[in-house]
């Protein structure tokens, strides 16, 4: 099966059965990623006087109560409500079903004790990219170790984006930024300078953090399906899906 679409007069196609899921599954009973020293995600059987939601313990069915903190427990997407006083709901911002996007891979630059994503790094990675597909951008940061799926980033000063890099990405027209880091900003930056720079120019844009992009996913252009539950909140756990695309020359 193939779906065909056209962007700016150019024809492309993709197979909806072939895709990469770049979210991190949350193992409630095992190791999971964590950031900002927030409590781990947890799931417990619902228990009342007349009901037990655990088949193994005699319940009629399984029914669990889940505790999940988007910003510290795994792959999540956030909107401007993360920093504004209105607490603008993410489900009012994210409306596109398919987003043309690009995947790039970067090695952070070392600056004293920090590792940073600079404007120059982004410029170099994007100079040969098809800008038609820069509505979304997926950034894979090296080293790309599988332990990112269960990494405890708390107190580790992970890499972060400089404001100059964020402003450059905005100039490229990027509305949806996805990164495999716990935050766009430095861990100890309470002012969230990079977040504010990103939303200052486009309040209808989104940031997705704590993804994992397998090494088999090549840098290039894709269609992104950014799936979220319809929570009336500033952020939500998310499942970004990448569809490899092909250009049709006929």
Image: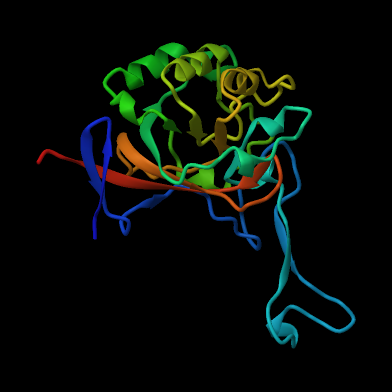
Total count of labels: 0
Q: Nearer the viewer, residue 42 or 157?
A: 42
Where is residue 168 drawn, in percent x and y?
46, 14
The outermost residue toward the front is 9
Place residue 61 in its image quadrant: bottom right
Horizontal arrangement in the rendering, residue 176 relative to residue 184 (left or right) = left
Q: What residue sits 57% from the left and 18% below the top?
A: 201
Q: Which quadrant holds the C terminus? A: top left
Q: Nearer the viewer, residue 112 or 193?
A: 193
**Is residue 155 shown to the viewer in this render?**
no
**Is residue 120 shown to the viewer in this render?**
yes
Compared with 117, 134 (above or below) is below
Compared with 211, 49 (above or below) is below
User: Which colour scheme appears in the figure?
Assistant: rainbow
Where is residue 90 drawn, in percent x and y?
64, 40
Q: Nearer the viewer, residue 155 or 139?
A: 139
Q: Nearer the viewer, residue 245 or 143?
A: 245
Q: What residue sits 48% from the left and 15% below the top?
A: 118
Q: Which quadrant holds the N terminus? A: bottom left
Where is residue 218 drawn, in percent x and y?
30, 38
Horizontal arrangement in the rendering, residue 66 relative to residue 128 (left or right) = right
The outermost residue toward the left is 250
Place residue 203 in its image quadrant: top right
Q: What residue sits 43% from the left and 37% below the top?
A: 144
Where is residue 111 drawn, in percent x and y?
54, 12
Q: What residue sits 52% from the left and 11% below the top?
A: 164
Horizontal arrangement in the rendering, residue 11 relative to residue 98 (left or right) = left
């Amino acid at each position: 099966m193939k779906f065909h679409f056209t962007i700016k007069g150019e024809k492309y196609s993709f197979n909806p059965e072939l895709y990469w899921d770049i979210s991190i599954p949350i193992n409630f009973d095992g190791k999971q990623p964590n950031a900002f020293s927030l409590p781990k995600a947890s799931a417990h059987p619902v228990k009342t006087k007349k009901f037990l939601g655990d088949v193994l313990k005699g319940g009629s069915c399984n029914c669990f109560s889940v505790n999940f903190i988007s910003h510290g427990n795994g792959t999540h997407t956030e909107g401007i409500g993360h920093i504004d006083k209105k607490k603008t709901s993410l489900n009012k911002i994210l409306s596109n079903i398919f987003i043309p996007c690009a995947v790039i891979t970067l090695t952070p630059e070392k600056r004293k004790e920090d590792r940073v994503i600079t404007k120059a790094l982004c410029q170099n990675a994007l100079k040969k990219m098809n800008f038609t597909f820069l509505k979304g951008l997926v950034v894979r940061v090296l080293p790309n170790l599988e332990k990112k799926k269960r990494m405890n980033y708390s107190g580790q000063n992970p890499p972060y984006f400089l404001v100059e890099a964020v402003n450059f990405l905005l100039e490229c027209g990027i509305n949806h930024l996805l990164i495999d880091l716990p935050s766009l900003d430095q861990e100890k930056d309470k002012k969230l300078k990079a977040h504010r720079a990103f939303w200052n120019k486009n309040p209808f844009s989104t940031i997705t953090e704590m993804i994992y992009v397998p090494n088999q996913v090549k840098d290039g252009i894709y269609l992104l399906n950014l799936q979220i539950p319809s929570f009336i909140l500033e952020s939500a756990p998310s499942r970004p899906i990448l569809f490899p695309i092909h250009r049709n020359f006929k």
